[in-house]
């Protein structure tokens, strides 16, 4: 559609035969008034006159043809656009009738982009199409579906939260307008200021949800329940409304937070007690440190004693794994009871937060036990912190908001790295490049869960050898040259989730002491020959003595 689109293109041409009889009607066969399903591309580029004609077709399923009302069999309307409706054009009512809003973003993953370049257009073959009778049957069944009391409470919470958000936004905008008015009065060019003040950013708009849209969303949820083989709407189903409640991009995050709170308020999330496992770990950590160190300095411990302590770690790991298995069974059982084919795994994880939070704690505890095993075997200094000390919430001396602020802090060798809150940092590239720092203690407790770039992070940091196995690197995309020339580094990294990493070129270039297993890495890398130590783009280029395979660590051979 475009601004020159005519009614004839959408609703059909004028019926000449009827016009000769002084009746102004259209030949609608094959056009929107007779369609069961329709697709309107670039809908907002069309003229408001045509778009407003769609109102009764979408809502009442009626098209006014001359002096007759035609019943429109429309079951579904899909619209596409690269823009939002232009404000103040009378299109708000039409936009309100488009219940589901989906953003289709450009491809991001490297593999997806390559598929875009290489693959032909995929022809979708429909082997088991749904019939109109089946669709009508689903519609009739959906009318009988009821909301559970918990789901009603969640919907009440949603509505109240949106109203509260709109009121607070209105007050904030009013205060901003008053401030701008005061500033305008003090300037000479009041005319230009007045024009600018009327161009309010979209992000200042409240979330408007009409009664019509609430009703349409209820029908949507009921239909989803029918297709889920359930007989009532449950709180988890409201997560589908994340695609219905927003009107512009700026509102998406607000809507998601409101839905999460509504779900949390209506669903009973059981809390699971793992304090006994934590206590078992704490006692074994304290006993290990007492056995392996004296005044925080390593002391001689024979291998037999070390083996006994390692066996105790194995016992703790077994208990953790048994608990994880039990939690996963509970999670899957609850997920089956709330089955909805339109929800993702992350939706269920958010809904069953009590289980997933405990699973995360157990994973962190398992990493802590792995670190304890490393302490037993290698007796490193400084001694890595206990799990409780690295994971508990505490106040920080330093809270940098940018990479530049963090760089200034780490350059000061008098600052203990554990006193720095890194949770807001997304880029740590070259952070310790050529660093002369010798004490990296506390870095193992850093929150790097938001970091995306770690390229050259420890490049040529000759003294760096701190345990990092507990780091959450799940969002990191770039690890190129991360440990290049870090000639002292030899710490376990096997627990890292590197599934998003796209670049590992020369990650361990000349890191000749590194001899740890990486066999659990779900490796996705864009470098050719990632494990070929002779290839210049390899992770391990020039890491080993190239003259003899016998110099390679056992895991690499």
Image: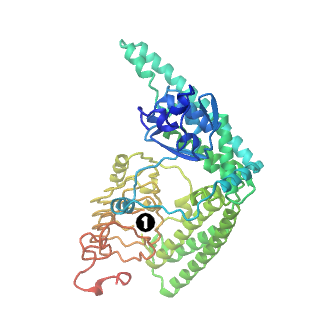
The residue shown at (41%, 70%) is 523
Q: Which residue is mark 1?
A: 498
Q: x%, y% of residue 301?
A: 48, 82
User: Between residues 315 and 36, which one lies in front from this camera angle?
Assistant: 36
**Vertical side of 89 occupied by 384: above or below:** below
Q: Residue furthest left?
A: 547
Q: Quadrant of the N terminus?
A: top left
> Is 332 situated left or right of 28 in this image?
right
- Mark 1 neighbour density, 10 Å: few (under 14) some (14–19) many (20 or more): many
> Is 515 situated left or right of 227 in this image?
left
Residue 555 visible in rendering: yes
User: Between residues 361 and 375, which one lies in front from this camera angle?
Assistant: 361
> Is 141 situated left or right of 178 in this image?
right
User: Between residues 452 and 266, which one lies in front from this camera angle?
Assistant: 266
The residue shown at (68%, 64%) is 336
**Vertical side of 350 occupied by 460: above or below:** below
Scheme by which the image is coloured: rainbow
**Vertical side of 190 occupied by 122: above or below:** below
Q: For the residue labelled by badge 1, is the local secondary structure a helix, a strand or a loop?
A: loop
Q: To which quarter of the image does residue 129 belong?
A: bottom right
Q: x%, y% of residue 319?
A: 63, 75
User: Between residues 503 and 511, which one lies in front from this camera angle?
Assistant: 503
Q: x%, y% of residue 86?
A: 46, 30
Q: x%, y% of residue 277?
A: 64, 70
């Amino acid at each position: 559609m475009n601004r020159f689109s005519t009614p004839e293109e959408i609703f059909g041409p004028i019926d000449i035969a009827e016009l000769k009889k002084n009746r102004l009607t259209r030949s609608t066969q094959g056009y929107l008034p007779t369609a069961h399903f329709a697709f309107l591309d670039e809908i907002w580029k069309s003229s408001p006159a045509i778009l407003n004609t769609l109102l009764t077709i979408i809502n009442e399923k009626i098209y006014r043809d001359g002096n007759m009302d035609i019943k429109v069999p429309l079951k579904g309307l899909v619209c596409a656009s690269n823009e939002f409706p232009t404000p103040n054009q009378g299109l708000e009512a039409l936009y309100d009738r488009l219940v589901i809003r989906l953003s289709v973003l450009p491809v991001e993953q490297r593999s997806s982009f390559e598929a875009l370049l290489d693959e032909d257009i995929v022809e979708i073959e429909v082997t088991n199409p749904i019939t109109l009778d089946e669709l009508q049957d689903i519609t009739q069944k959906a009318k009988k579906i009821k909301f559970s009391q918990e789901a009603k409470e969640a919907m009440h919470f949603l509505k109240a939260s949106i109203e509260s958000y709109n009121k607070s936004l209105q007050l904030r905008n009013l205060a901003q307008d008053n401030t701008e008015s005061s500033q305008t009065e003090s300037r000479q060019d009041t005319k230009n200021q007045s024009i600018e003040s009327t161009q309010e950013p979209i992000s200042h708009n409240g979330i408007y949800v009409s009664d019509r849209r609430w009703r349409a969303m209820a029908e949507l949820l009921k239909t989803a329940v029918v297709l889920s083989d359930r007989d009532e709407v449950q709180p988890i189903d409201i997560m589908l409304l994340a695609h219905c409640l927003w009107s512009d991009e700026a509102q998406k995050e607000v809507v998601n937070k409101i839905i999460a709170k509504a779900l949390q308020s209506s669903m009973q999330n059981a809390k699971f007690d793992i304090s006994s496992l934590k206590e078992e770990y704490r006692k074994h950590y304290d006993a290990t440190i007492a056995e392996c160190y004296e005044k925080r300095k390593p002391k001689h411990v024979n291998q037999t004693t070390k083996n006994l302590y390692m066996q105790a770690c194995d016992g703790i790991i077994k208990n953790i794994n048994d608990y994880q298995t039990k939690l996963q069974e509970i999670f899957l059982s609850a997920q089956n009871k709330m089955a909805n084919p339109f929800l993702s795994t992350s939706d269920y994880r958010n809904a069953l937060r009590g289980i997933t939070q405990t699973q995360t704690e157990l994973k962190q505890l398992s990493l802590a036990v792995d670190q304890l095993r490393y302490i037993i075997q290698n007796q490193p200094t400084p001694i890595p912190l206990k799990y409780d000390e690295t994971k508990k919430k505490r106040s920080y001396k330093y809270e940098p908001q940018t990479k530049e602020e963090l760089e200034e802090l780490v350059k000061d060798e008098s600052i203990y790295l554990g006193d720095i809150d890194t949770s807001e940092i997304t880029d740590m590239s070259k952070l310790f490049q050529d660093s002369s720092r010798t004490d990296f203690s506390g870095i193992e407790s850093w929150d790097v869960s938001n970091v995306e770039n770690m390229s050259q992070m420890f490049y040529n940091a000759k003294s760096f050898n701190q345990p990092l196995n507990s780091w959450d690197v799940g969002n990191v995309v770039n690890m190129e040259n991360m440990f290049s020339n870090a000639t002292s580094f030899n710490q376990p990294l096997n627990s890292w989730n590197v599934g998003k990493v796209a670049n590992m070129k020369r990650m361990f270039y000349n890191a000749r002491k590194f001899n740890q297993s990486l066999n659990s890495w779900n490796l996705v890398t864009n470098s050719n020959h990632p494990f070929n130590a002779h290839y210049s783009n390899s992770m391990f280029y020039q890491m080993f003595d190239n003259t003899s395979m016998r110099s390679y660590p056992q895991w690499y051979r």
